[in-house]
Image (tube, rainbow, N blue to C red):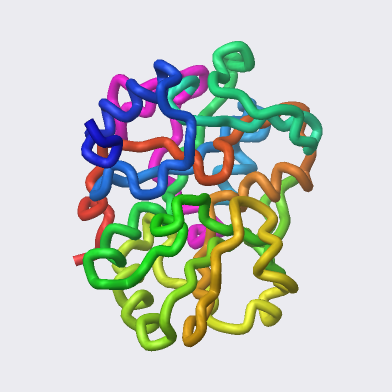
Amino acid sequence: MNLADLSPAQLRQRIRQGAFAGPTAGLANGYAQANLLVVRRELAFDFLLFCQRNPKACPLLEVTDPGSFEPRRIAPGADIRHDLPKYRIYRHGVLEQEVADITPFWEDDMLAFLIGCSFSFEGALLANGIPVRHIEDGHNVPMYRSNLPCVAAGSLAGPMVVSMRPMPAALAIRATQLTSRFPAVHGAPVHIGDPRQIGIADLERPDFGDPAQLREGEVPVFWACGVTPQAVVMQAKPALAISHAPGHMFISDLRDEQLALI
């Protein structure tokens, strides 16, 4: 069976078995995907406040109870310790390693924050004839540190990370209309056009993910990105934090339309 035809539960099972380890864009079309950040309880309040103050970059879908690895609201029975294709382990703000299972790193006082992902609105773009280049070309979405500041919370501060999708200029307004219906997965773009205006010097050198070709007549369109917590963690330097690897998301049981504004 084609991966694109599998349900969220079937995909999570494949991932848990080690049968799939790639980026999740284009999978489980119609279902919401989520970014992940796992922190110890001592940092959890600051991060919850950070999300509340920066809902564009960090729209929360769920926060687990301390020590719980089951996202009961968005995917009952799932296990965030090994249901994502790839994770990142950060120690004192430094990326230590990427792993396929975080069970050995899990601690009883940890909380998991699941944050809306822009992959969730890509089905709406495709259904309306708007190209999604990283799906077309089979690579990860490009992501960049911008100069757009986030609102600080306790020890947490830093720039917004943005994802970019090139498209014909005439479709950018339609893309804005469509994605504005999905504030729980970043909503409308934060910038359209010249990347230098938001501090991005070279589109060919993303900070995360892979570059996407910008064709003649196209403009880059930028959305707030759930990789923002990783940039913030690198700056705050907690003893231990765990995230998804960029582009390797948690696939939930929530339908995209459950998150859309009417």
Q: Quadrant of the C terminus?
A: bottom left
Up-down relation of residue 227 to residue 40 (above or below): below
Magenta stretch contains residue 54: yes
- Residue drawn where x is 59% and y is 16% of the image: 106
Q: Main secondary structure of the magenta part?
A: loop
Up-down relation of residue 169 to residue 134 (above or below): below
Question: Can residue 238 be seen in the rendering of this structure?
Answer: yes
Where does residue 208 sit, x and y in percent of width and height? 64, 51
In this rendering, would 211 be left or right of 130?
right
Magenta stretch contains residue 25: no
In the depicted view, which residue is nearer to us: 56 or 2? 2
Up-down relation of residue 174 to residue 152 (above or below): below
Where does residue 143 sit, x and y in percent of width and height? 60, 58
Where does residue 56 sit, x and y in percent of width and height? 49, 62
In this rendering, would 104 be left or right of 16?
right
- Residue drawn where x is 27% and y is 33% of the image: 8
Where does residue 128 sit, x and y in percent of width and height? 24, 71
- Residue drawn where x is 32% and y is 80% of the image: 174
Q: Quadrant of residue 124?
A: bottom left
Residue that lies at the very extreme toward the left in this rendered image = 262
In the depicted view, which residue is nearer to us: 140 or 96? 140
Question: Can residue 52 be seen in the rendering of this structure?
Answer: no
Count of marks placed on residues? 0
- Residue drawn where x is 21% and y is 55% of the image: 257
In the depicted view, which residue is nearer to us: 120 or 108? 120
Up-down relation of residue 220 to residue 14 (above or below): below
Q: Which residues are magenta?
A: 53-80
In the depicted view, which residue is nearer to us: 104 or 55? 104
Q: Quadrant of residue 167?
A: bottom left
Q: Quadrant of the N terminus?
A: top left
In this rendering, would 15 be left or right of 259?
right
